[in-house]
Image (cartoon, grey):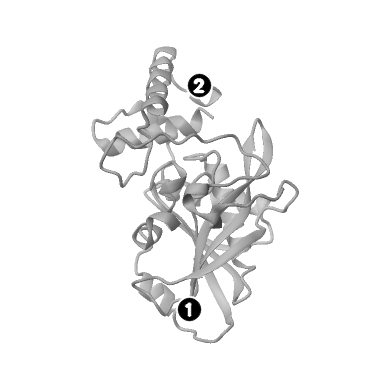
Amino acid sequence: MKHFDFLTKPTRSILVLILSAVIVFGTVGCSSDNQSSDEPTDSPAPSSTASVETNGDFYTYDQDFSTYSPGTLLRSESFTFEDWPDVPAWKILYITEVTQDDQPVNVLSSGYVLGPSTTTDATLSATPLIALAHGTSGYVPRCAPTILGEEVMLSGVPNLSEILNRGYAIVGTDYPGMGTNGLNPYLIGQDEAKAVLDSIRAAGQISELTLTNHNTIMGHSQGGGAALWTGILAPKYAPELNIAGVIAAAPASNIPQVFKDFGTNDLDRHIQAYALASFSN
């Protein structure tokens, strides 16, 4: 439990008891859920194959991907946004990397891509990109923004219509362990940042979309912290990507305080449960 070294021993003991209750009684669910009776969902350690049968075949990839390069696009599937039916959109499944036992491990992540609404050509060209790191939507696979729907997918994007009308594309990651199976690196900034950077790489492989290497990172709350880490990690992890800027709104950057400030409302309890589950792994 080295992640909890900043806490006193009695507090760590309390956290262990709370985490045990979270796992046993299944209080870890989607932050949009109003009930506390969610069925528990186990998150096994990352492996070179993964699947989520309950979320459909799109999130399943049964071949060995341990040697694939992070950012490899495995699958894309077009879909239609209800509020923006003329905007080209794709769900994506791609490879990213997390640290497990101090070693890099390939895992799956899902996400989505929106093309700009100003272009109707078959090939969308010369398109700058905004990479969205979403805020807290939950912890288990079914809480992925691509599963919960467009309101959650785009909750952190202000003035979306103007962004799309100005010719930008958007890529949003679900983060590993959401949509796909495996560990969810909730508030683990380095792993979240890798998922964001690899989503940019994956978006560049959609054949209908030609991106310029002009990437802006945007995130709020959990995603704000991920956005900051993306800017920090990019020169080393993805030096080929040009990061034009980082927009981090209300970033979750003081992680020890998340554990020390025990709130009394449901949202605080959910967030603490997610963080406990994530950091305990």
Query: Looking at the image, is 1 positioned above or below residue 98?
Result: above
What residue is pinned by disc 1? 167
Q: Nearer the viewer, residue 32 or 271?
A: 32
Where does residue 274 sit, x and y in percent of width and height?
41, 35
Q: Is residue 273 left or right of residue 61?
A: left
Query: Mark 2 is on which residue type?
Result: Asp
Which residue corresponds to mark 2?
A: 5
Query: Picture coordinates of residue 216 (x, y %)?
Result: 51, 63
Relative placement, left or right, of 250 versus 212 is left
Amino acid, disc 1: Gly
**Residue 5 in picture, x, y percent from top left:** 50, 21
Relative height, residue 125 to residue 173 (above, below): below
Quarter-of-image position of residue 215: bottom right
Visible in this render: residue 216? yes
Look at the image and tell me in which quarter the C terminus lies: top right
**Residue under the point 50% across and 31% down:** 279
Residue 231 visible (yes or no): no
Q: Nearer the viewer, residue 95 or 62?
A: 62
Residue 277 appears left or right of 269: right
